[in-house]
Image: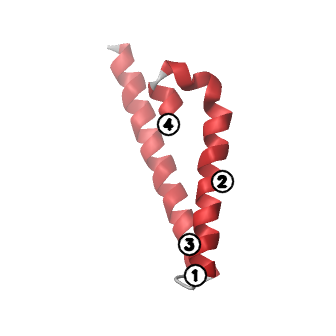
Amino acid sequence: MLPTFIKGLQKKTTFLLVIAISWTVMVMISRMIMGAHFLSDVIIGATIGLVCFFVVKDIVLKNISAFKKK
């Protein structure tokens, strides 16, 4: 969501996405290797996180577009 708010980062959207996905996958794998979580725990956690992200993203973008129209 950073490129949405910071115009200078709009050209780096793909790079930021790769960093975020890489970080998430590394954390997921490390939690399983350490024995702190099972695969099902990690997948459900990622799913919940993605759903929350997309819901918040939709709400924020709708509010931004409504604010710009005023």
Is 46 in front, or is 65? 46
Q: Which residue in the structure is indicated by mark 1? A: 34
The reply to whether residue 43 is visible in this rendering is no
Mark 4 → mark 1, Cα distance in angstroms: 31 Å
Q: In this view, does 10 lie to the left or right of 5?
A: right
Looking at the rendering, which quadrant does residue 40 occupy?
A: bottom right
What secondary structure is marked by label 2?
helix
Is 62 in front, or is 26? 26
> Which residue is painted at 39% across and 26% down in the image?
64
Which of the labelled discs sits on residue 1, or is there none?
A: 4
What percent of the width, then of the height, locates residue 65? 42, 23
What percent of the width, then of the height, locates residue 12? 63, 28
Mark 1 → mark 2, Cα distance in angstroms: 18 Å
Counting other residues with Cα less than 10 Å from the Cα at mark 2, is it few (<14), some (14-19), or many (20 or more)?
Answer: few
Q: Give, as a three-letter code, the residue at label 1.
A: Met
Q: Which residue in the structure is indicated by mark 3? A: 44
> Which residue is painted at 46% across and 49% down in the image?
55
**Does the residue at mark 3 contact the one at mark 4 (Cβ under 8 Å)?**
no
Counting other residues with Cα less than 10 Å from the Cα at mark 4, is it few (<14), some (14-19), or many (20 or more)?
Answer: some
Counting other residues with Cα less than 10 Å from the Cα at mark 1, is it few (<14), some (14-19), or many (20 or more)?
Answer: few
**Does the residue at mark 1 contact the one at mark 3 (Cβ under 8 Å)?**
no
Mark 1 → mark 3, Cα distance in angstroms: 18 Å
Which label's residue is closer to the chain start, 1 or 3?
Answer: 1
Which label's residue is closer to the chain start, 1 or 2?
Answer: 2
Which label's residue is closer to the chain start, 3 or 4?
Answer: 4
Q: Give, as a three-letter code, the residue at label 4.
A: Met
Against 13, residue 42 (above or below) is: below
